[in-house]
Image: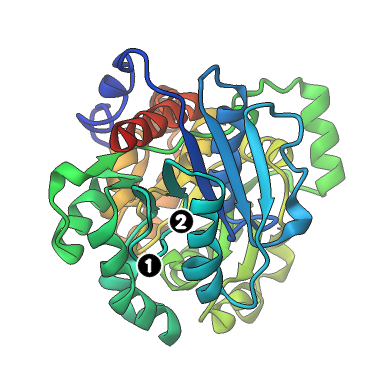
């Protein structure tokens, strides 16, 4: 179903353009960076923030704290950034001992973690980013050790943080509900999307990418890792009813098991869909943008998403989106995507058939999607988070 186009929420772009407060004192802002990986949503989020802050004209110094000292030099070209290697034998000692010592040694005024976790009772104000609380909504979809950490540690991080950055209004509401945080300490700041997804490809460039990646003539795409909330098995079963009959293949970008989904990864092959499936593995943003730009649709019928950035990335390229009618995907995509019931294979299959056969609907979603995607800018995200850090440090 498609509703009339509407803004994401009252807390998105209308407040993002508010001017920042006047002159602020120079701060030394510590950033906890033990989670950086080659790919993954939080790593992309973190790297984009660092990129924007490196280009920002501000009086502040960003002190990057790596658990892996080999990462030192990653931001060597940024004059407003210092890089510190803090090796530690395990995550707990890094969070609770190494980082605590670094706060004092490097005279940090405020501590920021783009992912959850903080030193308990740190000697300076602290902020962390909540990317979602799916472990409360779907506890059975998390590893036991993660469930224990989320149950006993995350509430403590929430209680001591001077502020929490939430990636969506849905997430903010869940923080209040499950972590008992007063709303005034929660700041909803939507992530951005990479400029790569706004690139206008020439026909020659698209043809070259199609040949290099061996893309089918017609296809829909799934993008991301596979774990229980992604609903990959139902997605594949719905595709099986529609795609081959209409001559449309399924391209899987990413598709690796993140956790608890070993049984789902090869569902296409178990259904005899091998001739119709193209697995790309992980691709960089530039190539992924070309994949989206030539796809008939992006399929993201997740049972839970706090945000669902792949659908915003796809919208920017002009790719229609099919996604869930609940949680963060509804919040961000309603009116600009085709919403389905993620618990129903019938609903997903019916939505896919409409997207592949209804020309006017496709154009409506393409236009609405580009308008929606324009609201998600990393420069605005970085400025809003910095304003929160300035506020709590003051």
In the image, residue 164 sits, relative to residue 26, either above or below, namely: below
Picture coordinates of residue 376, whole percent (x, y): 43, 29
The vertical placement of 273 against 304, above or below, is: below
On the question of residue 42 being in view, the answer is no
Q: Which residue is mark 1?
A: 345
When the figure is inspected, residue 337 is found, relative to residue 19, above or below; the finding is: below
Q: What SS does tag 2 mark?
A: loop
Residue 32: x percent and y percent?
53, 53
Name the residue located 28 percent from the left edge and 40 percent from the top edge: 188
For the point 59% across and 82% down, the residue is 262
Tag nearer the camera, 1 or 2 = 2
Give the distance between the C-alpha atoms of the residues marked 1 and 2, in whole angstroms: 33 Å
Give the quarter of the image for residue 333: top left
Q: Earlier in the sequence, mark 1 or mark 2?
A: 2
Residue 315, given in percent of the width and then of the height, sits at 49, 33
Q: Is residue 241 above or below residue 55?
A: below
Residue at image x 23%, y 31%? 11
Left or right of 244 in this view: 299: left
Frontmost residue, 103 versus 201 = 103
Which residue is found at the position 50% from the left and 36% from the top?
28
Residue 115 circle label: 2
């Amino acid at each position: 179903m498609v509703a009339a186009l509407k803004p994401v929420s009252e807390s998105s772009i209308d407040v993002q353009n508010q001017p920042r407060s006047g002159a602020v004192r120079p701060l030394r802002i510590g950033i906890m960076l033990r989670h950086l990986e080659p790919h993954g949503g939080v790593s992309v989020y973190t790297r984009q923030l660092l990129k924007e802050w490196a280009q920002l004209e501000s009086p502040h110094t960003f002190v990057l704290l790596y658990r892996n000292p080999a990462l030192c030099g990653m931001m060597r070209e940024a004059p407003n950034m210092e890089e510190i290697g803090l090796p530690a034998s395990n995550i707990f000692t890094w969070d609770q001992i190494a980082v605590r010592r670094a706060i004092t040694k490097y005279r940090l005024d405020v501590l920021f973690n783009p992912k959850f976790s903080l030193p308990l009772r740190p000697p300076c104000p602290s902020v962390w980013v909540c990317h979602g609380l799916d472990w409360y909504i779907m506890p059975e979809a998390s590893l036991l050790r993660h469930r224990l950490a989320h149950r006993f540690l995350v509430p403590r991080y929430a209680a001591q943080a001077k502020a929490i950055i939430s990636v969506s209004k849905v997430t903010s509401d869940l923080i209040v509900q499950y972590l008992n945080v007063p709303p005034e300490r929660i700041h909803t700041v939507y992530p951005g999307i990479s400029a790569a997804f706004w690139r206008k490809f020439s026909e020659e460039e698209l043809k070259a990418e199609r040949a290099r990646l061996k893309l089918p003539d017609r296809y829909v795409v799934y993008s991301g890792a596979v774990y229980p909330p992604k609903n990959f098995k139902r997605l594949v079963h719905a595709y099986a009813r529609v795609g081959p009959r209409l001559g449309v293949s399924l391209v899987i970008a990413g598709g690796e098991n993140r956790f608890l989904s070993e049984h789902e990864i090869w569902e296409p092959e178990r259904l005899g869909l091998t001739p119709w499936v193209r697995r790309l593995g992980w691709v960089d943003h530039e190539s992924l943008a070309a994949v989206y730009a030539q796809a008939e649709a992006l399929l993201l019928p997740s049972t839970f998403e706090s945000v669902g950035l792949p659908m915003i990335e796809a919208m920017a390229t002009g790719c229609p989106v099919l996604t869930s009618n609940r949680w963060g995907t509804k919040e961000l995509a309603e009116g600009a995507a085709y919403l389905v019931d993620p618990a129903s294979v019938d609903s997903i299959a019916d939505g896919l058939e409409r997207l592949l056969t209804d020309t006017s609907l496709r154009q409506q979603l393409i236009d609405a999607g580009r308008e929606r995607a324009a609201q998600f800018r990393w420069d605005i995200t970085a400025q809003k988070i910095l304003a929160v850090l300035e506020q709590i440090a003051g």
